Image (cartoon, rainbow, N blue to C red):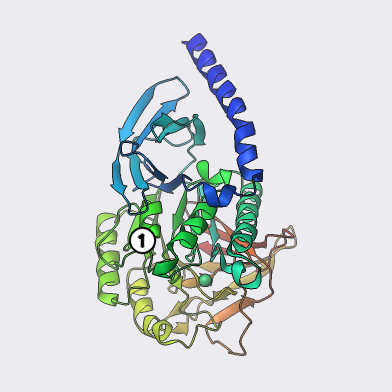
Amino acid sequence: MKNKVNLFSFLLSISIILSFPLLSFCHDSKNYFFENPYGICITPGEDETMLNFSWYSKKDNDSKIKIFNEFGEEKTYKGKSKKLDNNFVSNKVTVTNLKDNTTYYYSYKLNGVWSRPIEYKTKNSLEFSFAFMADPQIGASSRTLNSVEEGIKKDVLSWNKVINKALQKENNLSFIVCGGDETNTKEENQKKISNQEYSGYLSPYYLQYTPIANVIGNHDKDNENFYNHFYMPNSSSLGKNIAGGDYYFKYGNTLFLFLNTNNLNINEHKQFIENTLKKNEDVKWKIALFHHDIYGDGIHSQEKDIKQLRNTLPKILEKNKIDLALCGHDHIYSRTYTLKNNKKTKEFIIERFDDFNEKVEIINNSKGITYITGGSCTGSKFYKSTNNKSNYVKFKYDEENPLYTIINVSKDKIIIKTYKVNSDEMIDSKIIINK
Ligand SMILES: [Fe+2]
């Protein structure tokens, strides 16, 4: 048995080494972002034992993933394919029966050929970390540069950088959650550019072994590219538009609920949240993600849809005891007080400095919800700060620096730290939510 394992590991290593120069070339190649529409995306599956894979190809019968473990045992999973009107096929496959803390390898079928085996390590789902990034908005830089291609290329390099930084900071990341506006182009008649932006979004090599779950932003909502490129778990017909509906996944003791707030039918979101909680009564933590930051104080804060959401959504989140809400849209980082009934809760938040001289804010058994709006993670677009003085916002960071957030989840604690991509400094206190 041992010899078999060694031989298998040896063959895998050779295959990975042989394919590495090709990959490096792809990432250095000037046109890689525009000519490779085949980027694979791994999304967390319905729970920690599953993963969803999605990718484009040119052939009909490619929706297959082969998984093998370190003992050389292999299993092929079949999924579904959908022919698109741009001559591509969107493939989606779910893999099941994965165990925590285990090394697997996967191959996917691309134009009739199996890919090289790619290593994927599952993590400890009961004590884990994930990264939160908002508004990469690949392609938004085009408005300040000479061409669409230059804009996409610039944003893809920044996107690659923020993922790399997050993985360096926390090399055991279970996944990334992205708070919407993954790409920039919304217009139906600009499909070619939108496709290039999605190719860019999926081009970082890290995404071949780091799952990512995406919120539907206002830039993503009118375009079926979102739906075709990503395979959302537990996908609901509630909160739906052309890009998809509300969806969720469970990871260990934590439920991640993704609301498509482009759809303003609040009763559908309410129904989705209630149905989901009924099916998952045993979870400890509940984290909601949606694009429109209802309590931020950036330029969107007084817009009609935001006001409508602010008047309706928090009640539902509070009633269902959501612990944390993560949003985007404003391209300015802000963090609220713990809020309930549109007011600060009266609880005392402990503020102190820890042994590393980091400022810490500790929230104990709060009855309210902390809302965090991520700043732009790529810097593809910054908004100027407003003079609004929000009663909801406890801390705001409006300097033009790309940001990302690392969140650790364990049995009794959620720890949140937000960093500048370019200097590694924390911009806000370390937030600890105890429950
Ligand atoms: Fe945005």
For the residue pair 198 and 99, the one nearer the viewer reads as: 198
State left or right for residue 29 relative to residue 101. Answer: right
Q: Secondary structure at mark 1?
A: helix
For the residue pair 433 and 62, the one nearer the viewer reads as: 62
Q: Quadrant of residue 377?
A: bottom right
Q: Residue at x 56, y 64 (%)?
A: 139
Instruction: Give coordinates of residue 142: x percent, y percent.
Output: 60, 68
| Amino acid beneath label 1 | Glu
Q: Which residue is mark 1?
A: 224
Above/below status of 303 relative to 137: below
For the residue pair 172 and 166, the one nearer the viewer reads as: 166
Instruction: Give coordinates of residue 267: x percent, y percent.
Output: 25, 75
Q: Residue at x 33, y 41 (%)?
A: 94
Instruction: Give coordinates of residue 12: x percent, y percent.
Output: 53, 23
Q: Quadrant of residue 29?
A: top right
Q: Residue at x 51, y 62 (%)?
A: 434
For the residue pair 108 and 7, the one nearer the viewer reads as: 108
Q: Residues within 10 Å of mark 1 (few under 14, many from 20)?
A: some
Q: Quadrant of residue 92?
A: top left
Is residue 209 among the parts visible in the rendering? no
